[in-house]
Image (cartoon, grey):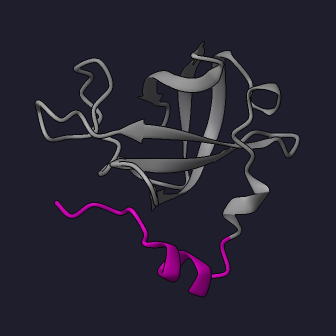
Amino acid sequence: MENNVLAWGKASQMGLRPKDYPYEKKLVPTGMVVARLDFKIWAKKVMGINGYFSQEGGLRFQLTVFLNKRLRNYKLNNESIDFAFCPVDCRYELKIGIKKDRPFLESIRCLEA
């Protein structure tokens, strides 16, 4: 199975607008959240994948899933979903926390089969 994470150049060619998805703590919801994963782009400065999510009502935000260096995958806490391969344009239940004054993805569960 091939990953579906875009490079920055490809995302730009496709007309995607990652800057419309903030990542600041005050603009990202926390707790249990349902949101659609619109697209994913490889992070520029770290080994990670930026996920761009939107909620009904128009709220948009982004979260980064970092490489698990030991396991060489993008799974959260040994969950079954590898973020590099999970489908886009799909609704997810997210658990979002705050660590070191930044939002982070604690868990993710697909709501559509």
**Residue in view at x 66 percent, y 22 percent:** 33
Horizontally, residue 62 falls left or right of residue 83, namely right
Please state the horizontal and vertical placement of residue 90, each as a whole percent of the image.
53, 47
| Quadrant including the N terminus | bottom left
Q: Would you say the magenta stretch is mainly helix, strand or loop?
A: loop
Tell me if residue 113 can be seen.
no
| Residue 90 relative to residue 22: left or right | left
Identify the image quadrant of residue 63: top right
- Decide if residue 111 is on the left or right side of residue 22: left
Q: Position of residue 8 (x, y in %)?
A: 50, 73
Q: Which residues are the magenta region?
A: 1-16
Q: Quadrant of the C terminus?
A: top left
Residue 76, magenta (yes or no): no
Q: Nearer the viewer, residue 27 or 101?
A: 101
**Viewer-closest of 93 and 18:** 18
In the depicted structure, whether residue 69 falls above or below residue 108: below
Whether residue 98 is visible:
yes
Residue at the image position 22 percent from the left and 20 percent from the top: 78
